[in-house]
Image (spheres, grey):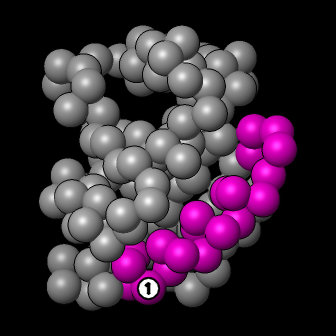
Amino acid sequence: MKFIFDKNFPINATRILDIFDRQNEMRHCTDLFERGTADTVWLREISGMDNKSIVLSHDGRILRNKVERNVLSECKLSFVYLTKTWAQTPWNDFVWKITRIWPNIVKDVSRIRTPKVFQVTQSKVIIT
């Protein structure tokens, strides 16, 4: 699987997950697009490259923005987002918690056949 992490996800955490998980591809959106590229633009680009990519975000606000939510739906991309509690988590805790839950994210995402939205708390993955 190919995971594309948005600009709100720490780039260093993307690199750590890439080392941790050697079976899946991890790319930060800043590896593929210039900083400041609108979500609507890079989401469309990603789906054009490979609509099997999974978008992972540190911020679920994209789901509250009608235009961005519609683009996500049109592009038929699965979307995984971390809940707000992750934002207040100190870096050291964030790293071990995200690597601890990562296998569950991969397992749950790999089971789906149609695009879904997943919410990730610090202890579980929920299909919304």
Picture quadrant where residue 29 is located: top left
Residue identified by numbered label 1: 100
What residue is rendered at 38% in x and 67% in y? 21
Is residue 75 depicted above or below 94 in this figure?
A: above
- Which sits in the foreground, 68 or 108? 108
Q: Residue furthest front?
A: 23
Task: From the top left corner, tell me how far across and down residue 108 is, in percent.
Answer: 70, 65
What residue is rendered at 26% in x and 25% in y? 32
**Residue 69 shows in the view:** no
Q: Residues within 10 Å of mark 1 (few under 14, many from 20)?
A: few
Is residue 39 depicted above or below 13 in this figure?
A: above
Left or right, residue 39 beside residue 113: left
Task: From the top left corner, tell me how far across and down residue 4 is, in percent.
Answer: 41, 40
Dot 1 falls on a residue whose secondary structure is helix
Where the C terminus falls, by quadrant?
bottom right
Is residue 100 depicted above or below 78 in this figure?
A: below
- Which sits in the foreground, 61 or 12? 12
Task: From the top left corner, tell me how far across and down residue 94 is, in percent.
Answer: 30, 78
Task: From the top left corner, tell me how far across and down residue 84 is, in percent.
Answer: 46, 66
Main SS of the magenta part reads: helix
What residue is rendered at 55% in x and 23% in y? 50
- Which sits in the foreground, 29 or 18? 18
**Is residue 108 one of those drawn in magenta?**
yes
Q: What's drawn in magenta, residue-wise?
A: 97-116
**Is residue 123 one of those drawn in magenta?**
no
Left or right, residue 83 beside residue 36: right
Q: Residue furthest right?
A: 113
Residue type (three-letter) at the residue carrying disc 1:
Arg
Is residue 106 depicted above or below 70 in this figure?
A: below
Left or right, residue 89 beside residue 67: left
**Residue 115 shows in the view:** yes
